[in-house]
Image (tube, grey):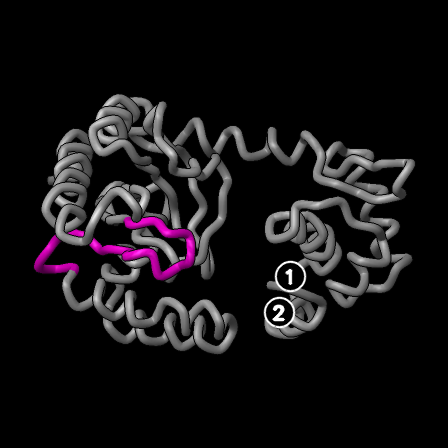
Amino acid sequence: MKDSDDLRRLRAEDPYFSGTLAKGLLILQTFVSDPRAHANSELAAKLGLSRPTVSRLCRSLLTMGFLDHDDRLDRYFIGPAAVALCYPYIINTPMLGMLRPAMQQLADRIEGAVSVGVATDLDVVYLETCAHEGGTLKRPGVGAVRGIVETAMGRAWLAQLPPAECQAFLGRVKRERPDEYARCSEGVRESLAQYTRRGFSINLGDTGFGVLAAGVAARIRYGPRRLLFNCAVPGLHWKKSRLLDTIGPGLVQLVGAADRQSGLR
């Protein structure tokens, strides 16, 4: 859900859907894609809500600590309660404590980063990243959001879907995020075609960050969602052949061991 048009559609489909709560969450969600401080007028224009509605909701969110306010700029930014709300989800991620040493070991061996995340709507959310201490790769922090088609872990998730669901999902990405789809569609097709044979998906830097990556979908579930693993390295230091021969198999081994520990293989 992106704005008031989506909100009205959902309310028409579901009479029990809470519009007021959704409006407040839309305000918070704005800061995920655009973390800078926002004025009431900006939020109202972006979300298609009236300024008085935004003003009331922001005051409530400020009182509860989910927003903070810069009096000098008269703008709102995300508050500490929003961070605290994420903490229970992170600490309850299945197997995460046991996986960190193996993730760090692999990250050090390839001088890159190993991450775990989950899919939500059109994106993946990163829950943990272990990065090589002296690496040049930018580390995606906890809570970082990337498009499913943009990431190797997202492509691994796609490969687990029934073909009809996968095609329907890609059709939605094409409609709602045409630039993202155009940039990544060829890489997505290659990963989907080869996932069963390889056991992992790949990203050859087609998302514009100069990063090569492999992705694997674990059998471990967190509620209804699979845990997804990503192993990324700087494209300047690695080639596709090493990605296929070293990184992908190494990540498959890590995830396979995690599945076995959880009793799923």
Q: Is residue 70 above or below residue 179?
A: above
Q: Quadrant of residue 184?
A: bottom left
| Residue shown at the point (32%, 35%) measured from the top left | 113
| Residue shown at the point (25%, 26%) measured from the top left | 108
Q: Report x, y in % for residue 136.
A: 38, 34
Q: Which residue is mark 2?
A: 10
Q: Amino acid at mark 1?
A: Phe
* Stretch in magenta: 195-212
Instruction: Tell me the SS state at disc 2.
Output: helix
Quarter of the image with the N terminus in it: bottom right
Q: Which residue is mark 1?
A: 17
Distance from the alpha carbon under mark 2 to that under mark 1: 7 Å
Q: Amino acid at mark 2?
A: Leu
- Along the line of sight, the residue nearer the viewer: 18 or 234: 234
* Residue 188 forms part of the magenta stretch: no
Q: Is residue 222 above or below residue 95?
A: below
